[in-house]
Image (cartoon, grey):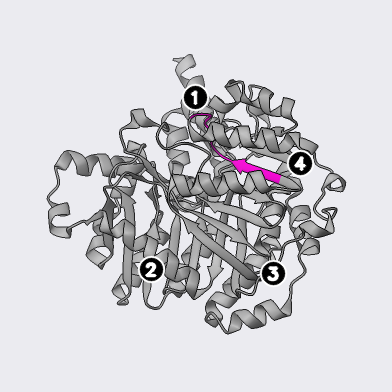
Amino acid sequence: MFEIQVTAVLHIILVLVFGLRVIARRLAVPTTLAWIIVIAAFPIIGLLFYFVFGDHRLGRKRIKLGPNIRNHFQDAYKINADVHKSLELKVSPYFRELSQIITAETGFLPSFGNRSVLISTPDGFFNALLQDIELAKNHCYLEFYIIEPYGKVCEVLEALCRTAERGVDCRIIADDIGSKDFFKSHWPQTLRQAGVIVVRSLPVGLLKSFSKRTDLRNHRKIIVIDQKIGYIGSFNLIDPDFFKRESRVGQWIDLVVRVEGHAVSSLACVFNTDYIFDHVGFDFQHSDLHDLPQDTKSKQYKRDAIFQILPSGPEMRSSLIYEVIVSAIFGARKKITIVTPYFVPDEAIVLALSNAAKRGLIVELILPHRVDSRMARYAGQANFSTLLEAGVQIYRFVGGMLHTKAILIDDSISFVGTVNMDMRSFYLNLEITLCAYDKEFAKALAAQMNEYLEKSRLINADIWAKRKPIEKWKERILRLAGPLL
């Protein structure tokens, strides 16, 4: 009897202590309640899961230097009044103010004089990248969540070796978990022998798990070549002919933007900052952001496309990208189109999309018919009925695993990058987004989205309501886990 009482008291103490810890973090209410329920119902397992997955622990030094990073960005890229004046002619005051918030929070201002090409096929991506690497004169910087050394990826790695051997500064940053197959292969050693610097991003280990949350990952995909060419989008460094064939979701479909212009400097700044954290250490004096040779400074082009780079992650204000997307949805006046592989929204996003549809806007969601995560699939589907009843058009892409992450607002404001429509991308992972305030870019993105729609099926609200009860229960149960996914 005494042992039962002691156990009960310890249980209450643990729930109170860690419950207060969760409350003190001021997370979203559903997330807070979900963690408290898990800890109360399964005290040992729940606490273990919270310790591993609940706290935003990216390392004290990295978190502490967040303000320094922003100050460094502010110094590197002074706000140019001409840019904001030019922005006034292109977008509404609402989105101009949104751009200013991004600048204030990240230090990155919108830059004009950019030109770009959307690349939507693996062959197009690999051919362009291989050519750019072979022609590089000063540096080739690659940062990816996943590098899998199979098929055409090996051609890219071989090209990097050749480029490094002729004296070009070549560096690779790869997430330690996402690129585990790469780090287990012979390629890191082969690349280093050729002169390529290979860096593990957010390395994991038993001891590191006490100071860093191991599931906070570097989800960015960035390429910078000679400070003149940049790539940003959803492409990992993988060959779709080999990648995750066992998942039976079809070939992965991605979108990447090849950029030339001042926006490349912002991409280089993000890469160099990640390089400092994961390789050099924490001394910003080691940064080479201001030491690049004069002839590698970003070039301005006659095209007046205005781009802004938005990095996000726990080392910055973690809710920024979430706030930008929600604000963009509320700021729309005509049409919203969202393409995402993982759709696990919270109530605010569901409300924003539903409200937009009820206001008479065209709201389109383009999602893959099959995804490689059943939990994410069912958690997301739990919101379909609410959205369909509001008038949101939900399409399912049947041409493969649609992995593109893009948002188009009013055929004028575009977001393309690595961010999924889920809480992990919004609050946890290191992400990168290109914000484009340009109608020509929006026109090209709209054309690509229309290609997706041609291979998609519109969900009928009446038919959806008649799906099997077991499917509905799966959605209802996994919806509770949505804030934790």
Q: Secondary structure at mark 1?
A: helix
Q: Position of residue 135 (x, y in %)?
A: 67, 48
1 or 4: tag closer to the N-terminus: 1
Answer whether residue 90 is visible to the viewer in this image.
Answer: yes
- Residue at numbered disc 3: 300
Q: In which quadrant of the rendered view does residue 249 lie?
A: top left
Relative to residue 47, is residue 332 drawn left or right? Answer: left
Residue identified by numbered label 1: 44
Quadrant of the snapshot with the N terminus: top left
Q: Which residues are magenta?
A: 140-150
Cα distance in 3D space between marks 4 and 3: 23 Å
For marks 1 and 2, give the CA distance.
44 Å
Residue type beneath disc 4: Asp
Task: Answer with the quarter of the image where residue 251 lies.
Answer: top left
Residue at which label 2 appears: 336
Mark 1 vs mark 4, CA separation in Å: 49 Å
In the displayed orientation, state which residue is furthest to the right: 285
Question: What label does residue 169 carry, if any?
Answer: 4
Quadrant housing the C terminus: top left
Residue at 68% across / 65% down in the picture? 262
Q: Classify 107 as above or below 252.
A: below
Residue visible at 47% across and 49% down?
Answer: 124
SS for tag 3?
loop
Residue 442 lies, in percent from the top left, at 46, 69
- Circle 1 or circle 2, nearest the eye: 2
Residue contact at pointers 1 and 3, CB within 8 angstroms: no
Badge 1 vs badge 2, beta-carbon distance below 8 Å = no
- Of marks 2 and 4, which one's residue comes earlier in the chain? 4
Q: In the figure, is residue 425 to the left or right of 336? A: right
